[in-house]
Image: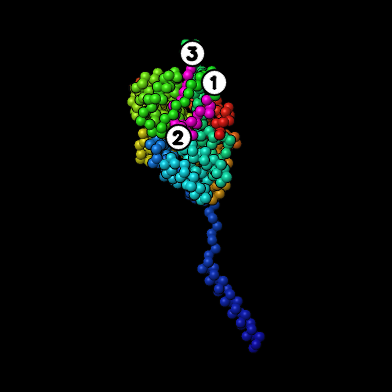
Amino acid sequence: MAKNRMYFLISVAMTLSLVFACISCATTPTPAPPEEGKKETVTITIGALLDLSGPTATSTLPGVDGLRDVNNYFNKKGGLDWDGGKVIVKIEEFDNRYDPSVSLPAYERMAARGLPVVLTHQSTDNLGLKDRAERDKVVIFTLSPTSGALVPPGWVFANYLSYADSFTGFLKWVKDTWDWEGKGTPQVASLTWDTAYGKAHLCAEPYAEELGIEYVGTEYSAILPTDVTPQVERLKELGADYVVTQAVTPIAIYMKDMHRLGFEGHLVIGLNTGLIEWIPAAGADAAVGTISLKGLIDMGSITADHPYMKKCKEIQDYLGIDRDISTFYPNGTSGMVIIQDAIVRALNKVGDPDKVTGQAIYDALIETKNLDTWGATTPISYSATQRRGSVSLRMTEAKPGGSIGLVHDWMEVPDALELYPTCAE
């Protein structure tokens, strides 16, 4: 009897064990294996330090529109394609109001959160953040190619040539096209801002002497002047044939006062602004003869059939917007194309959005070769020693009646940052 009872208890225990095992199976099912090749949509957030309401906002906002439009276009279409599915790029904007003292703490907050890229549009930000970005391994992608931020090569990248490069390119054009026999030695001067941005081309001034061109002087104006009569009168006394400026907001005043005072030379507008905005602001008569140096396509000098204009129309039609043509718009669109391309390639390489760090973006940018920006720039390439995506210059000129003509199509320029190391100081 005792033996039978023991067998009975063992039998009950085994039965209960099976029952509990089955209950466990029913309440905690084993997860199904992931579907082979299943795609997902991930989000990568980047930062942006922009002047959205400060003294340069009216000029730079079209560039911001270009950034936003390209990004919104792809996001609304479901995101960019990567090997694992789609990626949405979120831009977290901060309005620095052209004040570097508020840019630094904003950048530090972005870096502390692990944002891999911070977009900038100010020379002072580029210079102030260069060393910090390298320390923090955060890519600074700038729409304002400041020489000192790009050399020595670090973590600041630009979509096109530096201000100093545009000046060496312009001086070479003067040498190649000037009527030396009939007009003698060409005289070049500057009228600009007394700021890092305004003076960014002047480090390449010695190149004029190397080419036999005489650089006769530099005049400065306020950020928002109402009159530059004294400066123009001095430039007339100096006999300047060309007056180069890196200023932005005063250009209409420069044009009007030069026209009113009978200045017979050419005003030459440096990078980051152009003729589209300033011909209407100054008036067609005052603008005639003004030359624009561009590392970007000048939308006012091309037709609707140009590949860049076609792509802009496609984007804007899809978004239901209608932007006016602008000097800065191609700056923003090309910059966003470059960043999106780097994000996709970095994501494909690391395979996990949490691993898309500044280092991953940096590595992807370094490997960029001949990237098409729809014709906004020449094809973009970087390397271990090159932080300017394009080193080509395009020149246009204001014609009678307010039209814009082509002076010289894309030309590769002498490398000012290699020729003059002081440009990096």
Residue 209 shows which numbered tag? 1
Q: Is residue 187 magenta?
A: yes
**Which quarter of the figure is the N terminus placed in?**
bottom right
Instruction: Identify the residue at horizontal 53%, vertical 27% (top origin).
Output: 204
* Residue 411 visible somewhere in the drawing: no
Classify 387 as above or below 359.
above
The percent coordinates of residue 246 (x first, y second) are 45, 30
**Along the viewing direction, whichever of 167 and 362 lies nearer the viewer:** 167
Query: As drawn, is 137 to the left or to the right of 326?
Result: right
Q: Nearer the viewer, mark 3 or mark 2?
A: 3
Foreground residue, 36 or 375?
375
Task: Name the residue type under label 1.
Answer: Glu
Mark 2: give few (<14), some (14-19) or many (20+) Cα within 10 Å: many
Q: Is residue 100 above or below residue 11?
A: above
Q: Position of residue 314 (x, y in %)?
A: 40, 36
Mark 3 crowd level (few <14, some 14–19, many ≥20, 10 Å Cα): few
Q: Position of residue 388 (x, y in %)?
A: 53, 33
> Image quadrant for the C terminus?
top right
Residue bearing mark 2: 331
Kindly report the distance in space between the C-alpha atoms of the residues bearing marks 1 and 3.
14 Å
Q: Which residues are magenta?
A: 186-205
Mark drawn on residue 184: 3
Do the residues under discs 1 and 2 have CB atoms within 8 angstroms?
no
Is 47 or 222 nearer to us in this picture?
A: 222
